[in-house]
Image (cartoon, grey):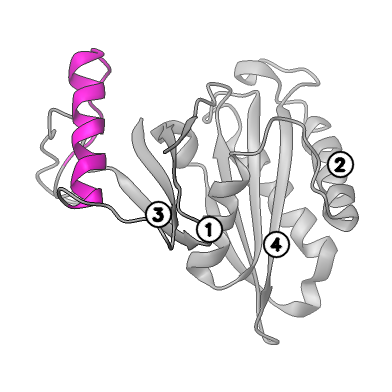
Amino acid sequence: GLTVVFVELGQEARVVGGALSEAIAEGVRKGYMEGYLRKSVVTQPYSARINTRDNTPPVIHYDVVPGDHLRLTVVPKGGGSENMSTLRMLVPADGRQGVVEFVVSCVDEAGANPCPPIIVGVGIGGTVEKATLLAKRALLRPVGQPSPNAEDAALEAELLSRINDLGIGPAGLGGRCTALAVHVETFPCHIASLPVAVNIQCHSARHKEAVL
């Protein structure tokens, strides 16, 4: 998949010897070349689509936090499930029920395409880009670990039940296990908005974290 890297950089830390983004890209390059992993990245996405042959560049998200550490979380994201992900700008009047219906409809329309059983990341609030990033980050939570927020945890439970009631099942062959988990992350938003993003992850949910 396309490599997504979440960087948590302590504000007291100092990176020397070159650009951090370049070092991360080099790590991705070595990992895919030396590990004989499939190279899935192409340039000029709407025309030439030429394979970069080393799976670079990665998508990097930075977050500056207190401390002197550097935390890297690496997530290879497959295209099949990413293609089924979506965003909708609901209106505040849609409320909780509108969120539920939108998320369930996304999974229903995706069907077998994201290779179920899936993990569903849901980002609610913020802005267009914040909601989608929340949904992506939600996929990093251990599978089935409920949100520490009781209201969000209740929403996760309802969504998981509704999604599994769809009967899509593993590989779309039918059954009760369409989703392994639904993880919801929220953020305050504008009084006129209710952004909701759904980021779907196939059952091959791999990620690795290192702290320096």
Q: Foreground residue, 130 or 63? A: 63
Q: Residue 132 shows which numbered tag?
A: 1
SS of the residue at dot 4?
A: strand
* Residue on which disc 3 sits: 61
Q: Residue at x 41, y 31 (%)?
A: 78
Residue 33 is covered by the magenta coloring: yes
* Separation of marks 2 and 3 at Cα, in angstroms: 29 Å
Q: Earlier in the sequence, mark 1 or mark 3?
A: 3
Q: Residue at x 53, y 30 (%)?
A: 114
Residue type marked 2: Ala
Give the main secondary structure, helix, strand or loop, of the magenta stretch: helix
* Separation of marks 1 and 2 at Cα, in angstroms: 21 Å
Q: Residues within 10 Å of mark 1 (few under 14, many from 20)?
A: many
Residue type marked 1: Thr
Q: Residue at x 53, y 53 (%)?
A: 86
Of marks 2 and 3, the one in the foreground: 3
* Residue on which disc 4 sits: 186
Q: Quadrant of residue 112?
A: top right
Which stretch did the figure color magenta? 19-42
Q: Earlier in the sequence, mark 2 or mark 4?
A: 2
* Residue on which disc 2 sits: 157
Does residue 120 appear left or right of residue 76 in this picture? right
Residue type marked 4: Thr
Of marks 2 and 4, the one in the foreground: 4
Q: Earlier in the sequence, mark 2 or mark 3?
A: 3
Of marks 4 and 1, the one in the foreground: 4
Of marks 1 and 3, the one in the foreground: 3
Residue type marked 3: His
Q: x%, y% of residue 69?
A: 45, 48
